[in-house]
Amino acid sequence: MEQADVAQAIATLAAQGKAPSVQNLRRAVGYGSLRDIIKHRNACLTPQKEDTTMDTTTDTATLETTPVPLPLTEQAARRLQTAKEARNAALRARDYSRSNVALDYQVRETESEVRKAQGWVDQLEHSRDQLRQAIPEAARTLLIEESQLAALVETHRKAEARQAALVRQARQDLDRLRTDLLTVAGEAVP
């Protein structure tokens, strides 16, 4: 079991709004002992101090940055490779031994891990392909929505300009009528 698997499971659970409990992590990772899961979970959740080093040539302190986590597809491929290597080692150990039940059990366990890892790889590749197909559609949808917004704003601007012209004309008509009434009858209307 690798710490990266547990870190990814913690991120997945956080995205789902679930707590990174040992049981949730065990279900998310799909393999590993509770001891290892607890150890890796604690290592992931414990805040790490950032090391500062002094660059003597420029007299400035620089922070060492943590590496960017691997994409899920690469993590899955590594997990699959590790599971295959463990299975092959178990098969070799069983071949050198005669009728050892513990080795047979170990082979079955490692084959199960390979199937789980392969399932994760297949699931991630399927998700990757779906995302690749969904992005152009989402881009088209965004373009349509933006153009509809621009058209709506333009239509609203034109309607506002027409209405403002009507208000100006109505105000001029009212002022002209008041002026005419004052001229003809000498009456002033408020």
Image (spheres, rainbow, N blue to C red):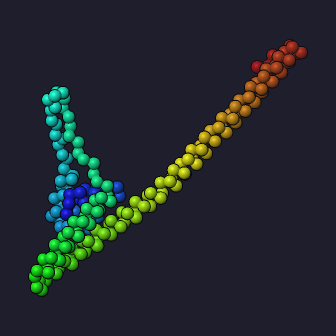
Q: Nearer the viewer, residue 98 or 13?
A: 98
Is the N terminus in the top left, top right, bottom left or bottom right quadrant? Answer: bottom left
Q: Residue furthest right?
A: 184
Q: Quadrant of residue 41?
A: bottom left
In the image: residue 189, left or right of residue 49: right
Q: Residue at x 65, y 37 (%)?
A: 154
Q: Nearer the viewer, residue 190 or 170?
A: 170
Q: Residue at x 16, y 31 (%)?
A: 55
In the image: residue 173, left or right of residue 84: right
Q: Position of residue 83 (x, y in %)?
A: 22, 68
Q: Quadrant of residue 102?
A: bottom left
Q: Residue at x 87, y 14 (%)?
A: 183
Q: Residue at x 40, y 62 (%)?
A: 127
In the image: residue 140, left or right of residue 34: right
- Residue 183, compared with residue 18, is above or below; it is above
Q: Residue furthest bottom?
A: 99
Instruction: Tell me if I can see residue 120 in this picture.
Output: yes
Is the C terminus in the top left, top right, bottom left or bottom right quadrant? Answer: top right
Q: Position of residue 15 (x, y in %)?
A: 34, 55
In the image: residue 50, left or right of residue 131: left
Q: Nearer the viewer, residue 70 or 174?
A: 70
Total numbered labels: 0
- Residue 52, compared with residue 23, is above or below; it is above
Q: Position of residue 182 (x, y in %)?
A: 84, 15
Instruction: Tell me if I can see residue 24 in this picture.
Output: no
Q: Position of residue 49 (x, y in %)?
A: 17, 42
- Residue 137, compared with residue 99, is above or below; it is above
- Residue 121, compared with residue 107, is above or below; it is above
